[in-house]
Image (cartoon, coloured by chain):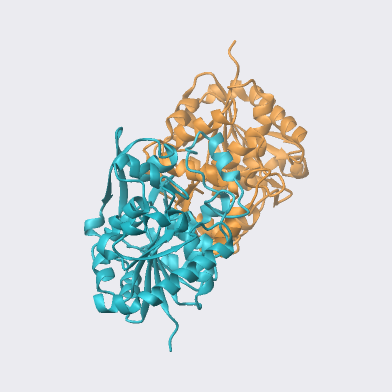
Chain colours: A cyan, B orange
Amino acid sequence: MSAPRIVALSGGIGGAKLSLGLYRVLPPGTLTVIVNTGDDFDHLGLRICPDIDTTLYTLAGLANTQLGWGRCDESWAFMEALAALGGETWFRLGDKDLALHLERTRRLKGGETLSAFVADVARRFGIHAAIVPMTDDPVRTRVGTVHGELDFQDYFVRRRCEPQVTALRFEGAARAQPAPAARAALADPSLEAIIVCPSNPYLSVDPILAVPGIVEALRQSAAPVIAVTPLVGGRAVKGPTAKIMAELGVPLSAATIAGHYGELLDGFVLDATDAALRGQFSCALRVTDSVMVTLADRERLAREVLTFARELRPQAAARA
Amino acid sequence: MSAPRIVALSGGIGGAKLSLGLYRVLPPGTLTVIVNTGDDFDHLGLRICPDIDTTLYTLAGLANTQLGWGRCDESWAFMEALAALGGETWFRLGDKDLALHLERTRRLKGGETLSAFVADVARRFGIHAAIVPMTDDPVRTRVGTVHGELDFQDYFVRRRCEPQVTALRFEGAARAQPAPAARAALADPSLEAIIVCPSNPYLSVDPILAVPGIVEALRQSAAPVIAVTPLVGGRAVKGPTAKIMAELGVPLSAATIAGHYGELLDGFVLDATDAALRGQFSCALRVTDSVMVTLADRERLAREVLTFARELRPQAAARA
C-alpha cells in the first residue's frame, strides 16, 4: 500500500504551524502544501513571497519563532545600513532572509517559475514535502478600506491592519492558472485528505480558492476536504481574522468560517472552547483543542485531523 | 580669497588613498573626486559601482582596511545564506554594503541619476567633498584577453586578473557625457589643480579620459594636471597594473605611465625609488616617497602634490 497523500492549503504563520505538524507525522514525501501567493509583492526591487517563505523556513526548522516571521539566528546589518541611507525600512528584511529574496528575484527574471524556484529551495533546505505556490501567475491581494484600496503589505505591515476593511480583491486571479504541481496533487487519485489550514479564510485561503480550477479540483476529489478553525472563542489565535470579520459585518464565530467555505467542506475541526456551536454546522465536526503552542500540539492536531479524514473518506468518495 | 578648488581623477583603492589624503588636508567643500565607473556592473540584479563605493567608504571613514574593499565592521550572513541557496558568490557582498547596492538600484530604476544618488549618500555619510561619477551614462570596461573579451569584474574578481590582457575597450564611452558636476568642476575658473591619482592608468583612469569632453576640459583648464605614479620600482603598489603593462608589451616603468598620459600632464610625481628615471620625463617632476601606508603618508603626499601644483600654476596658466 502506498503512503497516504495529503494536501494542505495554507497561508502564513497559522497555516505553517499545522503544515509542520502534518509534515512531522506523515511519511516523507507524502505532503503537499499549496501556499497562498496573494501576499507576494515587489519591494526594494525584490520579489517577496511571505507565505511561501514562512512555510519553507518552518518546515526546514529555520523559522524565527520569536518574531513569528523570517529566519532564526537572523541579523539586521543590512536594514541598519539601509536606514542610514534613508531607504525604506517599514518591511524588515534580515540579512539571511534577504538572500532568498535576491536569489528568487534573479531566477524569476531569468525565466524560472516560482514553483521551480521554491521546489529547489525546499530541496536545498532538506524538506521532504512539496511546497507549491497556488499559482505561478501574478495574483495580488488588494484590500479595500475606508481610506481607499491598499496593496496587501501596505495594509498588513506598514499600516498594521489598522484601516477598516470594506472589501478584498485578488487582482489577476481570474487569469491565473494553478501551479502544475498544485493541480497534480489535487487530482492525484491516491489523495487521502485536503486540509484547509487554520489560516485567515479571507486573506490567506480565499486567494487560493480564487485561482480558477482549484475549487473544481476540491469538489472533484474523492478525498475529504477538512478545514481547521482559525477562531477560538470568537478570537483569532493570530492575526487580523476577527478584526476583518467584524469590519465585513459577519458574526465572529467558527460557524461563519465553515459557512464561508460552504459545500466545499466535508468536515470542520472546531475548538473545544466553541463546542456549544456544534448545532450550527452542516458538515461533519471534530471538536478538539486546536491551539498549537508547542511542537507536540502541532503533531497531535495533525494526527487528529488525519484520523478525522480517514473517517470521512467513505462519505467524501460517495460525494465525488 | 576663496579656498582652492581641487579635482582628483580616481579609480578604486590606490586613488581613494590619495583622495583621502587630499580630503583631510584641504578645506571642507573644496575637493571634487571624479571617479571611474567603467568597473560598474550588474550582479544579482544590483547595480554595483566598486570605485564609487570605495571612494565613498574611504572618505566617510567606513572603508574596510583589512580587506582593501567594502565596509568596515562588515558581516557576511547574506553571502552565507546565498551560498546555501546555490547562488553566485564569486563577488562577495557584505550585509551592510548590500544596502548601498540595493538602494542605488532602486533609485536608479526610479529615474534618479547616479550623480544625484552618490551626492545624497556622500551627504548622509557626512562627507564634505564632491564625489562625482565620470558619467551618468553606462560605460563598461571590457577586457580583451587570450580567452576572448571579458566583462571587467569577470576578469578582475572572478578570474583574479589571470587571463592575459590583449586590449581594453570602454563600451559606451563614445556616447557618454561627463556628469554635470564633473564638467562643472573641471571648468571652474577657480580650479587650482587636477590630480590624476595613482590608480591603474589603463583600467581606472583611461575610462575617465575616454568620456568625450574630459580630455578637452583637462587641456583647457588653467590648473596644472599632475599625475601621481602608481608604479614604484617597476611594481604596482596594488593591483594588476604591472601585469597588464607586461601583457600589453610596454616597459614596466613610471616613465611609460607619464608617456601614456603624454601632453595632458603638466607634472608627474615620481617615487624616490625611481629617481634614476628622471631623464625620461618631458613634464615637470616631483620626486618623493609615494607609497601610502599610514594616514600620515596619505596626508603628506597630498600636501606635496598640492605644493607641486602651486609651483606649476604659472606654467599651466600660460599653456591653457
At a point 70% along the width and 44% down the height, the residue shown is B65
Point out the residue furthest to the left here.
Answer: A174
Question: Seen in the image, is B114 located left or right of residue B275?
Answer: left
* Residue farthest bottom in this picture: A1
Identified at 32% across, 46% down, the residue is A251
Task: Please tell me which residue is depicted at 71% across the width and 27% down the height of the picture.
Answer: B303
**Residue A311 figure quarter:** bottom left
> In this view of the protein, can residue B271 be seen by the observer?
yes
Of B176 and A20, nearer the camera is A20
Q: Position of residue B224 (x, y in %)?
A: 58, 27
Please tell me which residue lies in front, A135 or B253.
A135
Residue A103 can be seen, yes or no: no
Q: Quadrant of residue A167?
A: top left
The image quadrant of residue A214 is: bottom left
How far across and down, in percent of the image, does residue A218 sit?
A: 28, 69
Q: Is residue B276 above or below residue A116?
A: above
Location of the N terminus of chain B by quadrant is top right
* The one of B67 and B177 positioned closer to us in this rendering: B67
Residue in the picture at 30% in, 54% down? A139
Q: Give the x, y percent position of residue A231.
A: 42, 52
Query: Residue A240 in the image: x percent, y percent?
Result: 41, 45
Whether residue B168 is situated above or below residue A217 in the rendered picture: above
